[in-house]
Image: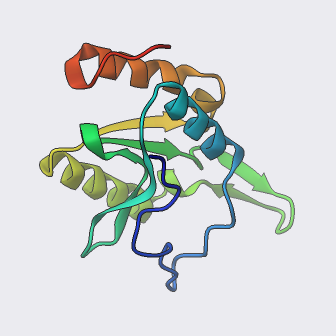
Amino acid sequence: MTRELFPGGSRPVGKKRKPKAGQREHEIVMGYHLRELHLDYFREYLFHERRRWRFDFAIAEHMLAIEIEGGAFEFFDVATQTRKVGGHVRGEQYYDNCAKYNEAQIQGWAVLRFSVQEVLNGQAKAVVARWLKRGNGIPTQT
Protein backbone atom coordinates (compact mmCIF):
# COMPACT_ATOMS: atom_id res chain seq x y z
CA MET A 1 0.00 0.00 0.00
CA THR A 2 1.34 3.44 -0.88
CA ARG A 3 0.40 6.37 1.30
CA GLU A 4 1.10 9.93 0.28
CA LEU A 5 1.04 11.34 3.81
CA PHE A 6 1.69 9.71 7.15
CA PRO A 7 -1.59 8.98 8.93
CA GLY A 8 -2.42 11.55 11.54
CA GLY A 9 -2.62 14.80 9.69
CA SER A 10 -0.82 17.32 7.63
CA ARG A 11 2.58 18.93 7.87
CA PRO A 12 2.66 21.36 10.81
CA VAL A 13 2.76 25.05 10.05
CA GLY A 14 4.66 27.23 12.48
CA LYS A 15 6.53 30.50 12.49
CA LYS A 16 9.45 28.94 10.58
CA ARG A 17 7.47 26.50 8.42
CA LYS A 18 5.38 27.26 5.40
CA PRO A 19 2.70 24.87 4.21
CA LYS A 20 3.99 22.54 1.53
CA ALA A 21 2.36 23.44 -1.77
CA GLY A 22 1.89 20.16 -3.63
CA GLN A 23 4.51 17.74 -4.76
CA ARG A 24 7.50 18.82 -6.77
CA GLU A 25 8.70 16.92 -9.83
CA HIS A 26 11.49 15.11 -7.98
CA GLU A 27 9.06 13.91 -5.30
CA ILE A 28 6.73 12.48 -7.92
CA VAL A 29 9.64 10.81 -9.72
CA MET A 30 10.93 9.27 -6.46
CA GLY A 31 7.46 7.88 -5.78
CA TYR A 32 7.40 6.25 -9.23
CA HIS A 33 10.85 4.78 -8.67
CA LEU A 34 9.84 3.27 -5.32
CA ARG A 35 6.73 1.75 -6.89
CA GLU A 36 8.87 0.31 -9.70
CA LEU A 37 10.99 -1.33 -6.99
CA HIS A 38 7.75 -2.79 -5.52
CA LEU A 39 8.13 -0.87 -2.27
CA ASP A 40 5.35 0.42 -0.05
CA TYR A 41 6.22 3.85 1.26
CA PHE A 42 4.99 6.77 3.32
CA ARG A 43 5.42 10.43 2.39
CA GLU A 44 6.29 12.96 5.09
CA TYR A 45 6.69 10.19 7.66
CA LEU A 46 6.70 11.54 11.21
CA PHE A 47 9.40 9.57 13.05
CA HIS A 48 10.07 11.82 16.05
CA GLU A 49 6.97 13.14 17.81
CA ARG A 50 8.68 15.65 20.13
CA ARG A 51 10.83 17.33 17.47
CA ARG A 52 8.20 16.80 14.73
CA TRP A 53 10.91 15.47 12.38
CA ARG A 54 9.70 13.83 9.19
CA PHE A 55 11.33 11.83 6.42
CA ASP A 56 10.61 12.77 2.81
CA PHE A 57 10.00 9.07 2.12
CA ALA A 58 9.97 6.12 4.51
CA ILE A 59 9.83 2.42 3.78
CA ALA A 60 8.80 1.39 7.28
CA GLU A 61 9.00 -2.36 6.56
CA HIS A 62 12.77 -2.00 6.01
CA MET A 63 13.36 0.95 8.39
CA LEU A 64 14.69 2.89 5.39
CA ALA A 65 14.39 6.67 5.23
CA ILE A 66 14.97 8.61 2.03
CA GLU A 67 15.77 12.31 2.17
CA ILE A 68 15.94 14.52 -0.90
CA GLU A 69 18.25 17.42 -0.21
CA GLY A 70 17.19 20.49 -2.12
CA GLY A 71 18.63 23.94 -1.65
CA ALA A 72 22.28 22.91 -1.67
CA PHE A 73 23.57 25.69 -3.92
CA GLU A 74 23.87 29.43 -3.85
CA PHE A 75 21.42 31.15 -6.21
CA PHE A 76 20.41 34.61 -7.33
CA ASP A 77 16.92 35.69 -6.27
CA VAL A 78 15.59 37.82 -9.12
CA ALA A 79 12.74 39.24 -7.03
CA THR A 80 14.99 40.67 -4.31
CA GLN A 81 18.11 41.05 -6.47
CA THR A 82 20.22 39.25 -3.85
CA ARG A 83 22.35 36.13 -3.66
CA LYS A 84 20.91 33.43 -1.41
CA VAL A 85 22.04 30.09 -0.12
CA GLY A 86 19.74 27.07 0.07
CA GLY A 87 18.40 25.99 3.45
CA HIS A 88 20.29 22.72 3.68
CA VAL A 89 23.69 24.42 3.79
CA ARG A 90 22.89 27.29 6.15
CA GLY A 91 23.98 27.05 9.78
CA GLU A 92 20.85 26.37 11.79
CA GLN A 93 19.17 24.14 9.19
CA TYR A 94 22.39 22.20 8.59
CA TYR A 95 22.85 21.53 12.32
CA ASP A 96 19.19 20.55 12.70
CA ASN A 97 19.55 18.07 9.82
CA CYS A 98 22.64 16.56 11.46
CA ALA A 99 20.71 16.05 14.69
CA LYS A 100 17.74 14.62 12.76
CA TYR A 101 19.84 12.08 10.87
CA ASN A 102 21.76 11.05 13.99
CA GLU A 103 18.53 10.49 15.93
CA ALA A 104 17.14 8.45 13.03
CA GLN A 105 20.24 6.22 13.14
CA ILE A 106 19.90 5.82 16.91
CA GLN A 107 16.29 4.70 16.41
CA GLY A 108 17.44 2.08 13.91
CA TRP A 109 16.63 3.81 10.64
CA ALA A 110 18.96 3.66 7.66
CA VAL A 111 18.98 7.08 5.99
CA LEU A 112 19.80 7.48 2.30
CA ARG A 113 20.25 11.09 1.16
CA PHE A 114 19.97 12.24 -2.44
CA SER A 115 20.18 15.45 -4.42
CA VAL A 116 17.28 16.46 -6.65
CA GLN A 117 19.45 15.69 -9.68
CA GLU A 118 20.17 12.14 -8.45
CA VAL A 119 16.44 11.49 -8.18
CA LEU A 120 15.66 12.90 -11.62
CA ASN A 121 18.45 11.01 -13.42
CA GLY A 122 17.68 7.63 -11.77
CA GLN A 123 20.77 7.36 -9.58
CA ALA A 124 18.68 7.42 -6.41
CA LYS A 125 16.57 4.48 -7.62
CA ALA A 126 19.74 2.50 -8.38
CA VAL A 127 21.17 3.18 -4.91
CA VAL A 128 17.92 2.12 -3.19
CA ALA A 129 17.93 -1.08 -5.28
CA ARG A 130 21.56 -1.76 -4.29
CA TRP A 131 20.72 -1.13 -0.62
CA LEU A 132 17.89 -3.66 -0.80
CA LYS A 133 19.97 -6.27 -2.64
CA ARG A 134 22.78 -5.98 -0.10
CA GLY A 135 20.60 -7.89 2.31
CA ASN A 136 18.74 -4.97 3.85
CA GLY A 137 15.52 -5.91 2.15
CA ILE A 138 13.97 -8.24 -0.34
CA PRO A 139 15.54 -8.75 -3.78
CA THR A 140 14.15 -6.29 -6.29
CA GLN A 141 13.87 -5.83 -10.01
CA THR A 142 15.49 -2.73 -11.47
Q: Residue at x 62, y 68 (%)?
A: 20
- Which of the pair 84/40 is nearer the observer? 40
Up/down of 73 relative to 6, above or below:
above
Position in image of residue 100 (x %, y %) = 29, 57
Q: Residue at x 77, y 53 (%)?
A: 76
User: Looking at the rendering, which quadrant does residue 127 occupy?
Assistant: top left
- Which of the pair 62/77 is nearer the observer? 62
Is 16 left or right of 76, judged from the image as shown?
A: left
Position in image of residue 123 (x %, y %) = 54, 21
Position in image of residue 130 (x %, y %) = 37, 16
Q: Give the mark count.
A: 0
- Which of the pair 93/61 is nearer the observer? 61
Up/down of 46 relative to 136, above or below:
below
Is 141 left or right of 78, judged from the image as shown?
A: left
Up/down of 37 relative to 85, above or below:
above
Q: Residue at x 86, y 59 (%)?
A: 78
Q: Residue at x 40, y 55 (%)?
A: 94
